[in-house]
Amino acid sequence: MLPLSAEIKGNLSFRTGVQAGISLAIGYMPIAFAYGLLSKTTGLTFWETVAMSAFVFAGASQYTALSMIAAGANLLEIVLTTFFMNIRHLLMSTSINEKVEPDKWWKKALYGFMITDESFSVAATREEKMLSTPFMFGLGVIGYGSWVVNSALGYLIGAGLPQTLQTGMAVALYAMFIGLLVPAAKKSRKVILLAGTAAILNSLFSLYEPLNAGWRIILSTLISAVLIEFISKGE
Amino acid sequence: MTEEIYWMIAGMAIVTYTPRMLPLVLLNASRIHPRLQGILKNVPYAILGALIFPGVITIDPNHLSFGIIGALVAFIAAYLNWNVILVVLSSILALSLYSFIEK
């Protein structure tokens, strides 16, 4: 058996993590910016807006919370909805745990705070077999920084950005997901099957109103990951 | 109102952080059954498919062409093995131009 050498760990530094996270930091800009603006129009103060980004750090549920506040929902309803939207992180955290270097529990608990759809996708599609703790911190911190700073800027500068640029930037995170998926799909038929099956299932589920986005993503991901695993068993 | 918002933020923070942190802290990767490991390794690619579709089509629910063009530009750039940052930037640029011409 090989020792746990730098080669296997990929020897990834904090700096490499930051570099890997630049695309998601760019992707967060318009979304955090728009959140800041929306929060202001919903009537939250500057610090409430920044605190939600700093402590929750979950785009879709922050938007949902704002619209529920506007609709007069109570605290418990908002927290419960947030829980159901974000329980999918359980799946990502379990999956990435297979790929990160073993380390002290509190370090993993710290960078665990910064696991999002986006940072997970960047980390999980890296070619290295094992990701170091500094890499995970670098990747997390640049995305987190972008999210909090741009939420604040959105609140302060508001509608200052030209509309055409704002519309164009809405595509950013999707472009990033595509940029991560396509290179892997070119190399492996299994990747195409996995992504294709989940995409079709999620599109079908989206036609069924009562299922929120969080549950849709969990269901379509799980069904696809299990199904394709059993189908490709013989390969 | 203000105090209630901070309670809400605290509640949201707890229910969001717990599922992010628990598996990393509690699970021992080497003790997981190989079949389950296989499934977990599939998760990233499956989740990317679910994150992209149908969301990308509905970026602008009034102009479906918008999302389709953005996705297509990103796909081509990614297919040419461009760096992810360039994929993101080229897609933003293409859509900004498109929306500038359209409106």
Image: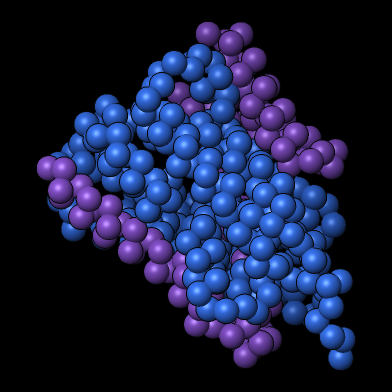
Picture coordinates of residue A112, whole percent (x, y) = 51, 65
A223 or B94, which lies in front? B94
Please give the letter of the chain rendered in purple.
Answer: B
Q: Quadrant of the N terminus of chain B?
A: top left
Q: Is residue A92 left or right of residue A63?
A: right
The quarter of the picture where residue A65 lies is top left
Residue at the far left: name it. Answer: B1
Q: Quick check: A48 above or below A78? A: above
For the question of whether residue B49 can be seen, the reply is: yes
Q: Colour of chain A?
A: blue
Image-based side of A34 in relation to B85, left or right = left
x, y percent for residue B34: 68, 86
Q: Position of residue A18 (x, y in %)?
A: 67, 49
Q: Of A44 and B101, which appears nearest the observer?
A: A44
State the image coordinates of residue A179 (x, y, percent, origin top left): 72, 44
Q: Is residue A170 above or below residue A122?
A: above
What residue do we see at 26% from left, 60% from top? B11
Task: Name above or below for residue B51 compared with residue A32.
Answer: below
- Residue drawn at x 43%, y 29% is A153
Residue A222, compared with residue A234, is above or below; it is: above
